[in-house]
Amino acid sequence: PASTQPLRTGDLAVGGVSLAELADRFGTPSYVIDEGEVRERARAWRTALPDADIAYAGKAFLSRAMIRWVEEEGLSLDVCSAGELELAALSGFPAERIVLHGNAKSPADLRDALRLGVGRIVIDSTGEIASLAAQMPPGARQRVLLRVVPGIAAGAHSAVRTGVEGQKFGLPIAGGEAEDAVARILGQPRLELVGLHCHLGSQIAGLGPYVTAVRKLVALLAELRDRHGVTFPELDLGGGFAIAYREGDPVLDPALYATRVTGELALQCARFGLPVPRLTVEPGRWIAGPAGVALYRVLAVKSTGGRTFVAVDGGMSDNPRPALYGVRYTVRLVGRASTAPARSATVVGRHCEAGDVLAEDVPLPGDIRPGDVLAVPAAGAYQVSMASAYNLVGRPPVVAVSEGRARLLVRRETLEDLRSRDVGE
Ligand code: LLP
């Protein structure tokens, strides 16, 4: 069952700092991240699952500060590129607590992972088994997990449903592909298979899919024990935990997840007489998303064809999620009080396509005008990390707020940054 909770962010102040002041000081568009909120959300998972490994999925949002916060909160880190790995290493994150993912790991990804000594590499395909073993330095052994596909459809959009067959990640349990890969890994003395991994999808509010995944994965573990005489100490169930983008959206509760999932795991393991593996979960969005707020300034207001368009100074370059997945956001006016009656407006960006919409038909005060500051809550995940420089609009800065103070974490990408990459004639 999914529970609901009110949106915490989007208030006029975040982390004790006024959003309007932040817009003035750091300019717009900009992203604000509340350090206290990130830490609290990390702790919520540690408290819910004290015996599990909680690996923050860095793809949601990564910066050196973020890496330090999750490290200090005792979390591990899920990375999926040499870039994310290098940033973690630069920040002194313990390599042992890093897990490397990827359906197409580049030679650089693997070289870096082996050089830095990451704790786990998640094998995603049969071809990767021999190629990873071949790259291992003499005498070395790498702990690996195998990503399997349990055949479970869950997730907010087809683009983020990875638990079903017929998409690029992992090896299906059905048809024996996963079992075949396990046998191959067991045949590689340089690889130590420590367990199975699956990631069902993203923005999942219900617990049903996770419970089903436990059943399917434990059934596979029993089969592997019976046919190959092996048991594994770990089980990684991935992430995908839903947050609220709008008031009333169903969210996943870590405490409920913990009860249902660990309960089912114990039950299924007992049923097959298997040792209970240590659980790993990989929350990304759940930790970073609600801690972030995007700030924009209104550039133009236009009423046309019976609709009101409020155009802001960002758009699909800093938040492609409405265009990619049809996500609906909330938008709030900050920095001034308005008594004007609310009317429905569509908040659009400044990019040169009609699909550059940030929020379709949201209630906003009727007197919105150029210069106003708008805040979009729940902006901490998959926005900064997915930002592009489309139309040569530089990527926005990231500002951390904590205990009434603000500091710049990532500076704005300038036109000079963009120009300097263009080295041809
Ligand atoms: N583990 C693995 C192996 C993953 O691939 C992902 C996300 C996660 C964990 C974390 O999932 P989360 O807890 O954040 O849902 N760009 C999309 C989301 C893509 C998620 C990709 N993988 C979006 O903006 O909704």
Image (spheres, helix red, strand yellow):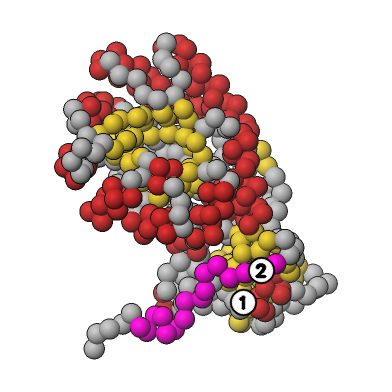
Whether residue 406 appears in this view of the structure is yes
Q: In which quarter of the image is residue 231?
A: top left
Is residue 413 on the magenta stretch? yes
Q: Where is residue 278 in the image (x, y as percent from the top left)?
A: 46, 27
User: Distance from label 2 to label 1 (Cα)?
Assistant: 10 Å
- As drawn, the label of residue 26 is 1
User: What residue lies at 26% left-to-right and 56% top-to-bottom?
Assistant: 108
Total numbered circles = 2
User: What residue lies at 34% left-to-right and 54% top-to-bottom?
Assistant: 81
Is residue 312 on the magenta stretch? no
User: What residue lies at 31% left-to-right and 82% top-to-bottom?
Assistant: 422
* Mark 2 CB lies closer than 8 A to ligand 1: no
Looking at the image, do the residues carrying marks 2 and 1 touch, with CB atoms under 8 Å apart? Answer: yes
Which of discs 2 and 1 lies nearer the camera? The answer is 2
What are the residue bounds of the magenta stretch?
A: 405-420
Mark 2 and mark 1 lie on one chain; the one further toward the N terminus is 1
Q: Which kind of residue does numbered mark 2 sit on?
A: Ala
Between residues 311 and 58, which one lies in front from this camera angle?
58
